[in-house]
Image (tube, helix red, strand yellow):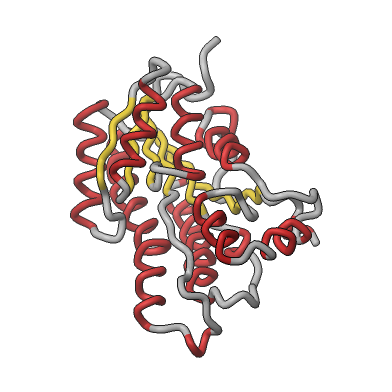
Amino acid sequence: MAGHVEGKVALVTGGASGIGRATALTFAREGAKVVIADMNEDGGQQTVHLITEKGGEAIFVRTDVSKAVEVQALISQAVATYGQLDCAHNNAGIGSRPRAPLHECTEETWDRVLAINLTGVWLCMKYEILQMLTQGSGTIVNTASIMGLVGSWSGTAAYNASKHGVVGLTKTAALEYATAGIRVNAVCPGYIQTPLIEEALTSNPALEAQIVTRHPVGRMGQPEEIAEAVVWLCSDAASFVTGHTMTVDGGYVAQ
């Protein structure tokens, strides 16, 4: 039986770990050739190995998504290698570190978070869409967050602003390219057990119980649960879905 994205070419940024790695593996399982982008070369190559050892096709391209020249080169290499670009998951992102109330957030922290989480998504979309317009079709899924839908008191103003921006970019792009055969959606994960979260829990073990209680289902999510949503949104099964921000959050924002 053919997979949901059989024969397609999929790009995943931030594919060296966490949600990005899980999505890359799911794309491969469902029949896509996968281009993995990340700053972490070791992790990215490991993701490639996890795909190829099961008979899939994948390449890694080291990319800083905040730099236009590197994003443009990434898209060019994807097309040069596989001939097209059908699906893109713009997932690369960072958290606000150190956490601090808005009036204590440094310009350095603000600029860094926005450069990767928002400008990086915009740059990826820009060059992905340029390629998809030449093909007459394509699908894009951006990783936003529940913090792109609600506020927070946890000292993450830059992160929240960046993720709200991703939601706005997604909706605008969906409308601009709806008649060009290009669908654009976003996923808004709740708290997911990724290296980013594990790092925070290591420094503050009591945080886990607080996080779990915020989710009505009584647990954090797994990267694979986000990956399944992303790949579905990129598949023909979601052909009438565009401009949607899909919460995958265990009920977090329903409260």
Give residue 149's quadrant in the image.
Answer: bottom right
78 shown above or below 94: above
The residue that appears at 24% across and 59% down in the rendered structure is 67
Number of callouts: 0
Whether residue 171 sits left or right of residue 79 in the image: it is: right
183 shown above or below 47: below
Q: Nearer the viewer, residue 199 or 213?
A: 199
Quadrant where the C terminus sits is bottom right
Residue 21: x percent and y percent? 45, 38
The residue that appears at 49% across and 45% down in the rendered structure is 18
246 shown above or below 88: below
Residue 15: x percent and y percent? 40, 42
Give residue 211's quadrant in the image.
Answer: bottom right
Whether residue 112 sits left or right of residue 91 in the image: it is: left
Residue 174: x percent and y percent? 49, 50
The residue that appears at 36% across and 41% down in the rendered structure is 43
Quadrant where the N terminus sits is top right
The residue that appears at 28% across and 36% down in the rendered structure is 60
Q: Nearer the viewer, residue 96 or 234?
A: 96
